[in-house]
Amino acid sequence: MNAADDKRVVIFDTTLRDGEQAPGCSMTLDEKLRVAAALAELKVDIIEAGFPAASPGDFESVQTIARTIEGPTICGLARCNTEDIKLVWDAVRDAQQPRIHVFVATSQIHREHKLQMAKEEIIKVAVESVTLARSLCEDVEFSPEDAARTEPEYLAEVVQAAIEAGATTVNIPDTVGYTVPGEFFELFRYLKANVAGIDNIRLSAHCHDDLGLAVANSLAAVQAGARQIECTINGIGERAGNCSLEEVVMALRTRQEYFGLETGIRTQRLYPTSRIVANVTGMHAPRNKAIVGENAFSHEAGIHQHGMLRHHTTYEIMRPEDVGLSRSNLVLGKHSGRHAFRERVEQLGFEMDDVELNRCFKEFKELADRKKELYDQDIEAIIMNVDVGKAGPWAIEELHITAGTGSIAAAALRISHTDGRELRQAAAGDGPVAAVFRALEQATGVELVLKNFEVHGVTVGDDAQGEVTVTVEYNQQSYRGHAVSTDIVESAAFAYLEVINRVIRRREGTGQVAAENVALGNP
């Protein structure tokens, strides 16, 4: 590594691999492409696009991202076996910059209870796998899974063997979020002092957040010499999640005089990217989430407000504009024109062509007729939901609800099909939402099992839009639907119909499907 590299921290985003493995976060191919495009605009260095051996759908998504997304290195994950490694290479080989990432568990508990392999066997497998990967691809990353709980002396042996076999990046994962900053710092220092050739490769950290220390541990690793951080947008991931990209990046930027390091991240895209991932996965960032939470730049205490009026640095260590948030919130009204709308969209960090802008502007004008005041979040919701439910084949044309205290809720609807058919259906339920869901199932002939129903207020006020996310099961496969409207029942209906349409398209073999999430073990 040269001197310039020593001051640069590479950002390895694994939202599409480790992040997607969080319960309820599986994505369709179109959703993965949308997230991958946002990550490229954010200027992450590496996108870990998935685990090709997990399923044919996962292979397809990694391959499509590799062939479509320009800029970042596109990486695929493989266990240390020949079939996995060749699948990854077939998936990523068409990328501008491909990478193969191989892993094998090294800790005593994994050796004895999961792999049932001796230390020497694991080193042999690691060397053979890195050698094979390097024969296919110049950029090879190796991860000793559960490194943080591996005996340091043995870990050093494994790492040195991987480097000698040709690994260009060695990642040290805290797979179960067990370590603490001081301990992780010492582990990296130990490896730097005891592994020959380690200064010729890039060291990486991959931390989970089981004890809430993923960001702190990642920063400790960087201080000890790591120059790659593996992280996810909004910190999503298995169990308690992963190191949060936006938090670790802004920590390095805000405290640049302390760390003396920089990233290539376009930080003004952090908030828009966070919203896109939240929209796609249905997992919204908590209000008090650092950097991208709704309260991150809010000040309510009187003494804080007084200080802010004097100078923003009294209570803010970052400017909201630095992460893609606007200081003002109340934005446009029903009389606002296309030019003002475009300007606001650009200020919020979104880029779109004229066709997309026209579609969004039409939705904006329709919403402005229903709402007295529109906010930035309303525009974001329009941008990210303008196509929801438009793919068909069914669309809701009319929806009528009756409900009241002491009475049975009922729903009557009219839906149209892309082939010209129209159907009317009425149904009763325990409440208006249940009645709508039953009517949609009876009309379309698709019966779903509702697993989760979430409502999120996009803005404030009694006319605020409601963001509804439904998670359902059909034929033992999980699906997620999402929609936004000023009417919660209408929003729920659109979200449920989105899932029904996806099931129908999958059944007919005409649409992209979500890749099955197979638990194969990973860093």
Image: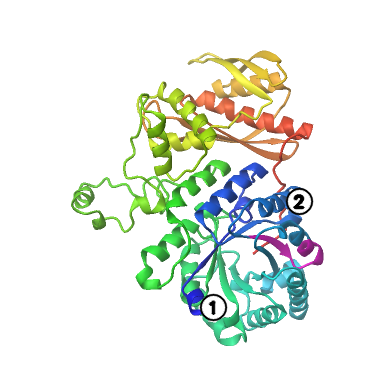
Instruction: Classify mark 2: residues with Cα within 10 Å, few (<14), some (14-19) or many (20+).
Output: some
Name the amino acid, label 1. Phe
Going 50% across and 52% down the picture, which residue do you hit?
A: 234
Instruction: Classify mark 1: residues with Cα within 10 Å, few (<14), some (14-19) or many (20+).
Output: many
Residue 7 in the image: state x and y as whole percent: 46, 74
Residue 271 in the image: state x and y as whole percent: 44, 49
Residue 164 in the image: state x and y as whole percent: 70, 82
Looking at the image, residue 121 sits to the left or right of residue 73; the answer is right
**Between 349 and 26, the one nearer to me in the picture:** 349
Going 70% across and 67% down the picture, which residue do you hit?
A: 102
Going 35% across and 45% down the picture, which residue do you hit?
A: 326
Q: Quadrant of residue 128?
A: bottom right
Q: Magenta stretch: residue 85 in it?
A: yes
The quadrant of the picture occupied by the C terminus is bottom right
Viewer can see residue 455: no
Q: Which mark is residue 55?
A: 2
C-alpha distance separating marks 2 and 1? 35 Å
- In the picture of the structure, the residue carrying the numbered disc 1 is 188
Q: Secondary structure at mark 2?
A: loop
**Between 177 and 423, the one nearer to me in the picture:** 423
Name the amino acid, label 2. Ser
Q: Magenta stretch: residue 97 in it?
A: no
Q: Which mark is residue 476?
A: none
Q: Secondary structure at mark 1?
A: helix
In this picture, is 264 found above or below 156? above
Viewer can see residue 132: yes
The quadrant of the picture occupied by the N terminus is bottom right
User: Magenta part of the protein: which range?
Assistant: 74-86
The total number of labels drawn is 2
Q: Quadrant of residue 317?
A: bottom left
